[in-house]
Image (tube, rainbow, N blue to C red):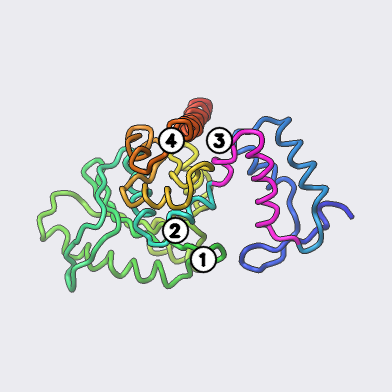
Amino acid sequence: MKNDNFEVIKSSGKRVRFSLSKLRSSLKRSGANKETIDSIIDKVRDELYQGISTKEIYNRAYALLKKKKSYLASKYKLKKAIYELGPTGFPFERFIKEILRYSGYDTFVGEVLNGKCVSHEIDVIANKNNETTIIECKFHGEQGLNCNVKVPLYINSRFRDIKSSWESNGNGTSLNSCWVVTNTRFSEDAVQYGRCSGLYLLSWDYPNNESLRDRIDKLGLYPITVSTLLTKREKQFLLSRNIVLCRQLLGDVFYLDHLGISDTRKEKILSEIDALCEISKTHHETNS
């Protein structure tokens, strides 16, 4: 049977045709060279069967990539690593805050703004060029859960309430935009409403070339959860200390001492993270 005739099952339960080009593209994003990619694709292709899950394909490709170089596997697991920022949405909010901060914004989390009718706690507030943007984050800890139109509808009503009283409160900047950010995807009607209402929607793969995935790759801002060497407990400890980026750990190495990690293992962890940040820097310079 030809490879393009295989049906695979997505996390949502939907059946789709297996796409060799998508697998190649995801491996290429990891920074792996052509020889490594071809080798992995050959092995995965030989193990395909009708009705295989995309999760199983991912796990196999990930394991093969990890055997080659762990930092490539770290980059490859980006989507899964974003889910691991849970179970609460707070680390994801701080992660979005850092993405905006490295994009030139002054950023704040958990601020309360007064509206005309009621007050609102805002996930992230970003200021740039004397303009203020409010950002609301919708985090999902499970794959297959997308944001429907109710999410931007609700957030737009909050934005309008805040905007109606913004200038009268003497904030000193203009409030012209509101973002809705999710780590999953928006439904078609959610995207349609966002376009019509003027909301800026940002998801894992939307908008094209400016999606969350694209922004992370361009800026090289990988969450600490991409590490293949840190345990789940260690990652949760770092997240509880507001260490959400790999590059933050490079500057706050003492947290690894708090965790009682041996010098040998610490060297391996930092080497992996340093390599990941370096390949991200090279990728950014090549594409800038």
Magenta span = 52-77
Nearer-N-terminus badge (2/1): 1
Q: What residue would you read off at disc 1?
A: 146
Looking at the image, is mark 4 or mark 3 nearer the viewer? 4
* 152 relative to 67 in the view: left or right: left
Residue at screen point 29% across, 41% down: 105
Residue at screen point 51% across, 33% down: 272
Q: What residue would you read off at disc 4?
A: 262
Residue 139: x and y, percent? 42, 61
> Do tag 2 and tag 4 residues touch (Cβ < 8 Å)?
no
Classify 205 as above or below 282.
below
Nearer-N-terminus badge (2/4): 2
Q: What residue would you read off at disc 3?
A: 71
Q: Nearer the viewer, residue 180 or 8?
A: 8
> Do tag 4 and tag 3 residues touch (Cβ < 8 Å)?
no
Q: Amino acid at mark 2?
A: Thr
Residue 128: x and y, percent? 26, 42
Which element type, helix, strand or loop, lies under badge 1?
loop
Q: Amino acid at mark 4?
A: Ser
Q: Nearer the viewer, residue 264 or 245?
A: 264
> Do tag 4 and tag 1 residues touch (Cβ < 8 Å)?
no
> Do tag 3 and tag 1 residues touch (Cβ < 8 Å)?
no
Nearer-N-terminus badge (4/1): 1
Q: Disc 2 versus disc 3: distance between alpha carbons?
A: 25 Å
- Using the image, tell me which numbered label, if any, was put on residue 182: 2
Badge 4: residue crowd in 10 Å (few <14, some 14–19, many ≥20): few
